[in-house]
Image (cartoon, rainbow, N blue to C red):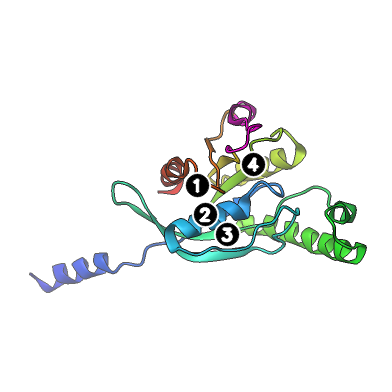
Amino acid sequence: MPIKRLLRFFNRLFKKKKQIKLGIYGPPNGGKTTLANRICLDWLGEELGSASHIPHETRRVQMKERVVIQSGDGKTLDLTVVDTPGIATKIDYENFVKKGLSKKEARARAREATRGVIEAIKWLDNVDAVIVVLDATKNPVDQVNVTILGNLEARKIPFMIVANKIDLKKANVTRIREAFPNAKVIGISAKYGHNMDKFYEALFELVG
């Protein structure tokens, strides 16, 4: 084999694949960290971060690099999974008090959560694609969701919507599809792994 062809062969073989920064966005308690953990567990065997029933458990951007996922036909995606704090238009410390935190703890968490929202918005400049995680048991048409999707469309960032928590009786994926008819919507349960095969297929369509 001529030396030039041999060099081209090895360059293709060892060519460093571009890492795709995949941002996971959405309102608090939709299941963003649970989805990030599910992706990392499926492909790395380890979680990314801790999830909680208390809103704004994730108050700083956290990420996991080199999450390589594979399609059924042998294609691969090299992801950096970026789990962001929940987006909210108003953060009231009294909501944390209702969840059992002391007033001092609640005020501190409210300040941290506010900084987290700002950080999450700034990170939109660094991601290649976004998964918007919505709680399928809740009304999807609210100011937060419309603001998130409007931002993504204005910035022309590829995105799809995950309607999470389909394991719950009140889940209504159709309602989310009807609310955002121009977006790709996949119903899953990140907690139990339901429909994750369809999620990964859609992810390859989004960024593959």
Comparing labels 3 and 1, the label whose residue is closer to the camera: 1
| In front of the other: 80 or 193 | 193
- Give the residue displayed 64% in from the left and 62% down from the top: 50
The image position of residue 80, as x and y in percent, is: 50, 61
- The answer to whether the residue labelled 2 contacts the one labelled 4, judged by CB atoms less than 8 Å apart, is no
Mark nearer the N terminus (2 vs 4): 2
- The answer to whether the residue labelled 1 contacts the one labelled 4, judged by CB atoms less than 8 Å apart, is no
The N terminus lies in quadrant: bottom left
Residue farthest along the left direction in this orientation: 1
Q: Residues within 10 Å of mark 1 (few under 14, many from 20)?
A: some
**Distance from Cα at disc 3 to Cα at disc 2:** 13 Å
Query: Which structural element holds mark 2?
Result: helix
Query: Which structural element holds mark 3?
Result: strand
- The answer to whether the residue labelled 1 contacts the one labelled 2, judged by CB atoms less than 8 Å apart, is yes
Mark nearer the N terminus (1 vs 2): 2
Amino acid carrying label 3: it is Val
Q: What residue is shown with label 1?
A: 193
- The answer to whether the residue labelled 3 contacts the one labelled 1, judged by CB atoms less than 8 Å apart, is no
Q: What residue is shown with label 3?
A: 82
**Distance from Cα at disc 1 to Cα at disc 2:** 7 Å
Q: Which residues are magenta?
A: 166-180
Q: What residue is shown with label 4?
A: 134
Left or right: 143 in relation to 92: left
- Give the residue displayed 42% in from the left and 43% down from the top: 197
Amino acid carrying label 2: it is Arg
Q: What residue is shown with label 2?
A: 38
